[in-house]
Image (cartoon, grey):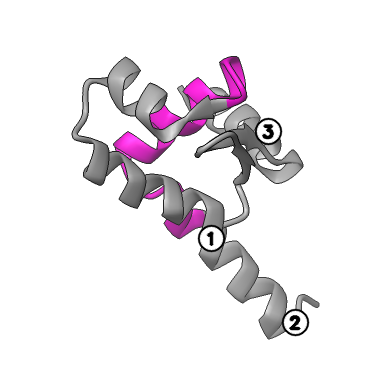
């Protein structure tokens, strides 16, 4: 039987991708890792602040990792993010 802690982890992941914009961002980061928040906002034609908010949620859900690259943050998919995007593609 799963523990409550495991259920919370699943909930966090599901909340992380419970938005079409975050799914789109995760898919973009999987295809082109190392993008900054500015790059992602530009490629998806969204406001930088809105994009940053969504990226923070993806990082909190442990679907994306962020690291410093110069003066900006770059983003890579986490192993969990790769599994989630594979799962989501099966739902299409």
Question: What secondary structure predominates along the stretch shown in magenta?
Answer: helix
Q: Nearer the viewer, mark 3 or mark 2?
A: 3
Please tell me whether residue 35 belongs to the stretch shown in magenta. Answer: no
- Residue at 44% x, 53% y is 56
For label 1, the SS is: helix
Q: Which residues are magenta?
A: 14-34
The mark that comes first in sequence, 2 or 1, is 2
Rendering coords of residue 73 (x, y %): 53, 40
Q: Residues within 10 Å of mark 1 (few under 14, many from 20)?
A: some
The mark that comes first in sequence, 3 or 1, is 1
Total marks placed: 3
Tell me if 86 is positioned left or right of 56 in this view: right
Q: Nearer the viewer, mark 2 or mark 1?
A: 1
Rendering coords of residue 59 (x, y %): 54, 52
* Residue most extreme to the bottom: 4
Which picture quadrant has residue 61?
bottom right
In the rendered image, the quadrant that contains the C terminus is top left
The residue labelled by disc 3 is: 82
For label 3, the SS is: helix
Please tell me whether residue 20 belongs to the stretch shown in magenta. Answer: yes
The residue labelled by disc 1 is: 60
Rendering coords of residue 45 (x, y %): 22, 21
Q: Nearer the viewer, mark 3 or mark 1?
A: 1
In the rendered image, the quadrant that contains the N terminus is bottom right
Which picture quadrant has residue 76?
top right
- Residue at 33% x, 16% y is 43
Q: CA distance from mark 2 to mark 1?
A: 21 Å
Q: Residues within 10 Å of mark 3 (few under 14, many from 20)?
A: some
What label does residue 3 carry, if any? 2
Q: CA distance from mark 3 to mark 1?
A: 15 Å
């Amino acid at each position: 039987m799963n523990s409550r802690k495991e259920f919370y982890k699943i909930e966090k992941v599901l909340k992380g991708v419970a938005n079409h914009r975050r799914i789109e961002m995760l898919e973009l980061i999987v295809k082109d890792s190392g993008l900054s928040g500015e790059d992602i906002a530009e490629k998806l034609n969204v406001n930088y602040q809105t994009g940053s908010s969504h990226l923070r949620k993806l990082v909190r859900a442990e679907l994306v990792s962020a690291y410093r690259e110069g003066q900006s943050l770059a983003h890579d998919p986490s192993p969990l993010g790769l599994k989630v995007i594979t799962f989501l593609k099966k739902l299409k």
